[in-house]
Image: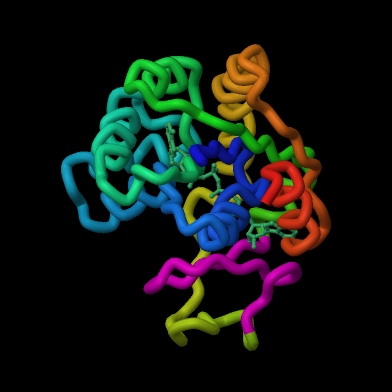
Amino acid sequence: MNIIFFGPPGAGKGTQAEIICTCLNIPTISTGAALREAVKNETPMGLAAKSAMESGSLVPDEVVIGIIRDRLAQDDCKNGYILDGFPRTVAQAEALDAMGQKIDTVISIVASDEKIVERLSGRRLCGVCGASYHLVYNPTKDNKTCDKCGADLIIRKDDAPEVVKSRLETYHAETEPVLAYYTEKGLVKSIETQEGVEETTRLVKQALCI
Ligand code: AP5
């Protein structure tokens, strides 16, 4: 099954994608994670993407389309995949079609701007293994270190309130039109995010009939 997780920043796409990819035994491909890795390793792509990411704008289409094209060509994508954070523009959606990729379902996770601000202000990440937590909704034992590997938790630079505002503006202006693109194709299943990861997962599984 080829699935897209769509929604505003902080809606819970990454959290749900991580759970569902284990259920279905297919990989999750996150352009955000790939770009953060490139920034961390100071690759030419990372250096080019850094300022856009830190200001809450989108990285140029050709960069993210290149990431996706290379990743989908790998063997582990043959039996299906989850795309998390791609496509984010209509041009990216068209490029995916032009690659001959057939999308089965688009899970649109709906969350208000207010909810997004609450989610992202409380998000913490493990600086080493990348595990994602929330101070209130998904806390670690001490809210300072990672339950999985014990490393310190960090705050994503783009979770600063002024950057979140800009990411939301970018989402409404450039990414929301992607939903109409897939709605016209009859592929969208919308889910209202729930107060709690498990209840949201229940709705996602129901929508995917798994
Ligand atoms: P990216 O990493 O994709 O960021 P994003 O879309 O803004 O999404 P997030 O990772 O912030 O949120 P999420 O929806 O995955 O939520 P999460 O599960 O973590 O992209 C970063 C940047 O890279 C972009 O701004 C852009 O610059 C660039 N980029 C990436 N892709 C691009 C593309 N295709 N084109 C151009 N540029 C691109 O959850 C958030 C928090 O809420 C967590 O703390 C979590 O624990 C908590 N939580 C989750 N679900 C629940 C729940 N149901 N109840 C309570 N808490 C919950």
Residue lying farthest to the top in this orientation = 184
* 104 vs 45, nearest the viewer: 104
Q: Is residue 52 shown to the viewer in this render?
A: yes
Q: Residue at x 49, y 16 (%)?
A: 90
Q: Residue at x 80, y 59 (%)?
A: 199
Q: How is the image coloured?
A: rainbow
Q: Residue 47, percent across and down? A: 23, 43
Q: Is residue 117 shown to the viewer in this render?
A: no
Q: Residue at x 73, y 61 (%)?
A: 197
Magenta stretch holds residue 121? no
Place residue 37 in its image quadrant.
bottom left
Q: Residue at x 37, y 19 (%)?
A: 95
Q: Residue 66, percent across and down? A: 26, 31
**Image check: 55 left or right of 195?**
left
**Image check: 19 left or right of 115?**
left
Above-or-below relation of 170 to 39? above
How many numbered circles are shown?
0
**Image check: 210 left or right of 115?**
left
Above-or-below relation of 182 to 58? above
Q: Residue 168, percent across and down? A: 63, 34
Above-or-below relation of 75 to 107? below
Q: Which residues are magenta?
A: 122-140
Q: Residue 161, percent across and down? A: 63, 48
* 113 vs 88, nearest the viewer: 88
Place residue 96 in its image quadrant.
top left
Q: Main structural element of the magenta stretch: helix, strand or loop?
A: loop
